[in-house]
Amino acid sequence: MKITRVEAIPFAIPYRKPLRFASGEVHVAEHVLVRVTTDDGVVGVAEAPPRPFTYGETQAGIVAVIDTIFAGQVVGLDLMEREQIHTRLSRTIGNPTAKSALDMAIWDALGQSLGYSVTELLGGYTDRMHVSHMLGFDEPAAMVDEAERMRDTYGITTFKVKVGRHPYRLDTAVVRALREGLGDDVELYVDGNRGWSASESARAMAEMGDLGLTFAEELCPADDVLGRRWLVQQLDVPLIADESVVTPADVTREVLGGSATAISIKTARTGFTTSRRVHHLAEGLGVELVMGNQIDGQLGSLCSVAFGSAFELTSRRAGELSNFLDMTDDLLADPLQIHGGQLVARSGPGLGAVIDPDKLARYRQD
Ligand code: MUC
Ligand code: MG
C-alpha cells in the first residue's frame, strides 16, 4: 500500500449559468483532478476546486504546489501512515484545497485497498444526507423559480441564499420572496461571504426577523473582531463561520472569541483528515456543523457526502451537495443522483468514484 505516484490534472467544464455571490463568481469549473497510485496498482481520486477570490489558490497554482512540493512529501509512504502524511503536508501554511484533494485521494486509495467505503472508515454513522441547494445572486423572481425547480425536480427543501449585496434591500427582498413563494415547509439560511459590515448585517437580519431563518453565515469579515462579536450577540440564529475557519485553530479562535456559533466543514478545504479534527473539535465545543460546498463538482460532492454521512453531527443538518447540477457535464462515469432531497454516499470500496476516461480526455487542460 505504498504511494508510488501523484498526478495533478487540470480540467475545465463550463457552468450552465454563472454562480454569483458577494466575494466572486464562477463561470467555468477550472478544477484539478488528483490521482494517487500505489505499488499494488490501486488509484485513488479527488478533485480540488480553486477559489482564488477566497483562498488565493488558482488551478495552475494547485497543479504546481502538488507537483513540486506535496507529491514528493507523500511518495514512498504507506497509505496507513496517515499522521505522517498529515504532518508533512501541514509544514506548508495555506494551500488548503491542494492539500485536501491529495488527502482525500489517499483515503480513497486506502478504502479501496482495505475493502471499506470512506464513510465506514471515518465513522460509518449512516449512508446518506439531506441536500441543501445554494442559490446564487439574481432577481427575486428568478431565485424563487430556481428554488421551485430544485424542490419539484429533486425534492430539495433546504436553501442557502447568497446575500451581501449593496444596498441590502435586494437581498432581503429575495429572502422574503422565497419565504412567500415556497411557504413555511422549506428551510432558509443566508450566506454573506463577508459582503456586509457588522452593522449592515444586523440591520438586514432585523429586517428578515419574521422570515424564520435557520442560520446566518459569514455575513461580515471575521477580522472585524469586535464588530462580529457584537453582531453574534444581536442574532437569534447561530452565525456560521465558513471561510474564516480554514484550520482547527481558526475554529477555536472564532468560537472561543465569541465571533461564531456554528461551523461549516468543507472537505474541499480540510480534506478528510482535518475535517475529522474539526468535527471532533466542534463536538467538544458544543457548536453545530453544516457540510458546506466550495462549489464542488460531482467528485467533490461525493467526498462531502462521504464525510457528512460518517458522523451524527454532520448528517443532522442538510449538506450543501447540489451545485454540481449547475455544471454542463462532469467527470464521473456514473453521475450522482439526488432523489427525495437526499444524496447517498457510495458503498465503496473507497469513494466508489469511477472517472470516465473519454470525459477526462475531453476536459483536461494539460
Ligand atoms: C460558500 O459557502 O461560501 C462561495 C465561495 C466559496 O469559497 O464557497 C462558496 C460557497
Ligand atoms: Mg459560505
Image (cartoon, rainbow, N blue to C red):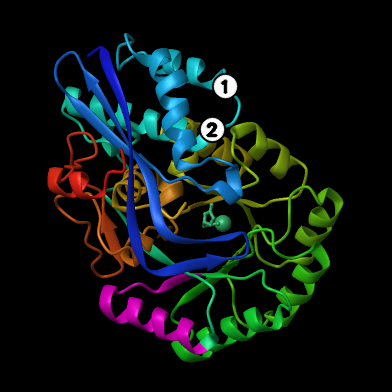
Disc 2 to disc 1, C-alpha distance: 8 Å
Q: Residue at x 51, y 84 (%)?
A: 178
Q: In terms of image quarters, where does ligand 2 lie?
A: bottom right
Please tell me which residue is depicted at 40% across the width and 14% down the height of the picture. 72
> Is residue 91 in view from this perspective?
yes
Find out whether the residues at labels 2 and 1 contact each other: C-beta distance under 8 Å. Answer: yes
Number of residues whose C-alpha sits closer than 10 Å to that of mark 2, classed few (under 14), some (14–19) or many (20 or more): many
Q: In which quarter of the image is the C terminus?
A: top left
Q: Dividing the image into 4 quarters, which one contains the N terminus?
A: top left
Q: Tell whether 186 sits left or right of 38.
A: right
The quadrant in which residue 82 appears is top left
Residue 115, placed above or below residue 222: above
The quarter holding residue 145 reads bottom left
Q: Is mark 1 on a helix, strand or loop?
A: loop
Q: Is residue 273 visible?
A: no
Q: Nearer the viewer, residue 286 or 51?
A: 51
Residue drawn 52% across the image and 35% down it: 96
Which secondary structure class fits the magenta region best? Answer: helix
Label 1 Cα neighbours within 10 Å, binned few <14 / some 14-19 / many ≥20: few
259 on left or right of 49: right
Asked whether 13 or 326 is in front, the reply is 13
Name the residue that disc number 2 marks.
95
Mark 2: which amino acid? Asn
Mark 1 — residue? 92
- Read off the magenta span: 141-160
Q: Is residue 273 above or below residue 147?
A: above
Instruction: Point out residue 213 in the picture as x, y percentages from the top left corner.
Output: 59, 73
The spot of residue 352 in percent (x, y) is 19, 41
Percent from the top left, x then y, of residue 148?
37, 83
x and y, in percent, of residue 266 in the image: 48, 46
Q: Residue at the location (43% across, 14% down)? A: 73
